[in-house]
Image: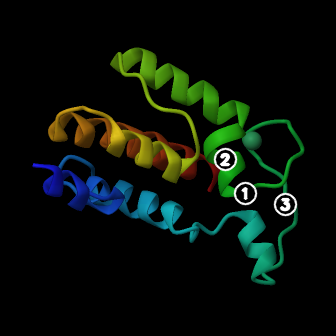
Amino acid sequence: MLGEQHRINVSDLIWTSVAQPRQRMIVWLGVHGRLLTKARMAHLNIPVDDANCCLCSSQVQETAHHLFAECDWFKEVKTGVLQWAGVQLPTGDIKQVLERIRRKHWKQFYKEVVVALWSAIIYQVWKARN
Ligand SMILES: [Zn+2]
């Protein structure tokens, strides 16, 4: 069954029936670096009043990596949700977490559930900063 394991990639874990469509979309955009963060807006020459993260007080530019890996506000939300759900999530940014879940020796359905939870966290944080 080694071949079957190899065919499962991160996309297969995102586009499942477990996660909500709008959550899957945000995660997909995040994995491909397409979320319109303030850093990306600046890169695309879209005027931004304040390029810093608006969720924490770090005065750090809002990048996807900051929002979904380093931001204290994000970490607090993430820790709270994971404690409530009784789930341990690998560390890293959006894509790294997905890659690490993919490599776990978990049942496929459990992976999908954990990815759905990760997707829900990302979605809520993304919604909060908009
Ligand atoms: Zn922040």
Element at badge 1? loop
Taking the spot 52% from the left edge, 47% from the top edge, the residue there is: 96
Q: Earlier in the sequence, mark 2 or mark 3?
A: 3
Horizontal side of 118 relative to 56 (left or right) equals left
Ligand 1 near label 3 (Cβ, under 8 Å)? no
Q: Nearer the viewer, mark 2 or mark 3?
A: 2
Q: How many marks?
A: 3
Picture coordinates of residue 95, whole percent (x, y): 50, 53
Q: Amino acid at mark 1?
A: Thr
Find the distance from the CA under tag 3 to the CA under tag 1: 9 Å
Name the image quarter holding the C terminus: bottom right
Residue identifier under label 1? 63
Taking the spot 68% from the left edge, 32% from the top edge, the residue there is: 73
Element at badge 3? loop
**Label pair 2/1, CB-CB below 8 angstroms:** yes
76 over 67 or under it: above or below: above
Label disc, if present, on residue 51 of the rendered structure: 3
**Label pair 3/1, CB-CB below 8 angstroms:** no
Ligand 1 near label 2 (Cβ, under 8 Å)? yes
Residue identifier under label 2? 67
Q: Amino acid at mark 3?
A: Ala
Taking the spot 42% from the left edge, 64% from the top edge, the residue there is: 28
Horizontal side of 37 relative to 114 (left or right) equals right
User: In the image shown, does 99 or 40 lie closer to the viewer?
Assistant: 99
Find the distance from the CA under tag 2 to the CA under tag 3: 12 Å
Horizontal side of 92 relative to 105 (left or right) equals right
